[in-house]
Image (cartoon, grey):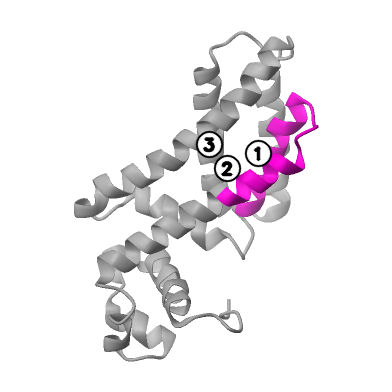
C-alpha cells in the first residue's frame, strides 16, 4: 500500500512503522528499519517522535481512534434498522475489516499489541484500549437492552450477550487467516445464524 499523496512526514513514518510492527512486533522493528522503509535518515524520525515507544503508542492510539470513528459512522447509518439488522451489520463490518486491505493492518496491529505487548507497555496499552472498549460496550448494550424491552431478544443478561459477541468477533479474526474469502463468508453466515438463534426470544 503506497503512501497517499500529500501525506505528512510524520504520517508516512507512522504508516510504514505500522506495517513493520505488524510483521515483526515491537522488538523486531528497529528505528533504522523504519527509516529505511520511509526513505529517510534515522535522525529524521526523532524530529517527529521522541523514541520508538512514543511512535508505537501514537500508532496504537490512532488505530483505536480509527476503529472508534468507523463504528460511530456505522451507528449513524443504521439508526432506523431493527435490532436483528443492527447486530448483523456490526458483525458483517467486523468480517469486512478483517479482510479489507485498507484497514486490516490497523486491526492486526491492535490485536498483536494486545496479545503480545512489550512488557513495559502492557498497562498503558490496556488502559488506552479499555477506554475505547467502554464506549463501544455502552453502544452495544443499548442495542441489546432495546431488543430485550421489545421482546425480540432473550432475557440473558446483556453483559453475557456482550461476552458472547466478543468471542465471536475474536473467532472471526482468527478465521480470517485460515480460509479464503468465499469459505470465510460462508462460515460468517453460519456463525451469525447460530448467534441470532441463541439470543433471540
Rendered view: 90 above or below 197: below
Q: Extreme left residue here? A: 120
Is residue 95 found left or right of 45 in the rendered image? right
Using the image, tell me which numbered label, if any, was put on residue 172.
2
Is residue 115 found left or right of 69 in the rendered image? left
Q: Which of the two labelled residues, at mark 3 and mark 1, occupies the earlier sequence position?
A: 1
Residue 71 lies within the magenta run: yes
Kindly report the distance in space between the C-alpha atoms of the residues bearing marks 2 and 3.
18 Å
Kindly report the distance in space between the C-alpha atoms of the residues bearing marks 2 and 1.
9 Å
- Where disc 1 sits, the SS reads helix
* Residue 24 visible at all: yes
- Circles 2 and 3, Cβ within 8 Å, touching? The answer is no
Range shown magenta = 69-97
Q: Which of the two labelled residues, at mark 2 and mark 3, occupies the earlier sequence position?
A: 3
Q: Which of the two labelled residues, at mark 2 and mark 1, occupies the earlier sequence position?
A: 1
Using the image, tell me which numbered label, if any, was put on residue 91.
1
Q: Which residue is mark 3?
A: 136
- Where disc 3 sits, the SS reads helix
Q: Residue at 54% of width from left, 80% of height from top?
A: 7
Amino acid at each position: 500500500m503506497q503512501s497517499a499523496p500529500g501525506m505528512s512526514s510524520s504520517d508516512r513514518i507512522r504508516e510504514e512503522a505500522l506495517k513493520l510492527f505488524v510483521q515483526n512486533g515491537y522488538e523486531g522493528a528497529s528505528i533504522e528499519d523504519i527509516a529505511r522503509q520511509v526513505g529517510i535518515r534515522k535522525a529524521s524520525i526523532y524530529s517527529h517522535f521522541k523514541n520508538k515507544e512514543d511512535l508505537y503508542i501514537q500508532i496504537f492510539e490512532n488505530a483505536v481512534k480509527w476503529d472508534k470513528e468507523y463504528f460511530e459512522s456505522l451507528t449513524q447509518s443504521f439508526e432506523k434498522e431493527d435490532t436483528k439488522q443492527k447486530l448483523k451489520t456490526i458483525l458483517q463490518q467486523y468480517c469486512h475489516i478483517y479482510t479489507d486491505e485498507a484497514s486490516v493492518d490497523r486491526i492486526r496491529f491492535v490485536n498483536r499489541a494486545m496479545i503480545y505487548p512489550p512488557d513495559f507497555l502492557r498497562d498503558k496499552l490496556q488502559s488506552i484500549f479499555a477506554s475505547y472498549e467502554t464506549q463501544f460496550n455502552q453502544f452495544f448494550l443499548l442495542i441489546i437492552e432495546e431488543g430485550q424491552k421489545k421482546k425480540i431478544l432473550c432475557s440473558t443478561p446483556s453483559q453475557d450477550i456482550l461476552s458472547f459477541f466478543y468471542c465471536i468477533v475474536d473467532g472471526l479474526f482468527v478465521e480470517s487467516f485460515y480460509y479464503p474469502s468465499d469459505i470465510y463468508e460462508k462460515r460468517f453466515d453460519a456463525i451469525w445464524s447460530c448467534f441470532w438463534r441463541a439470543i433471540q426470544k
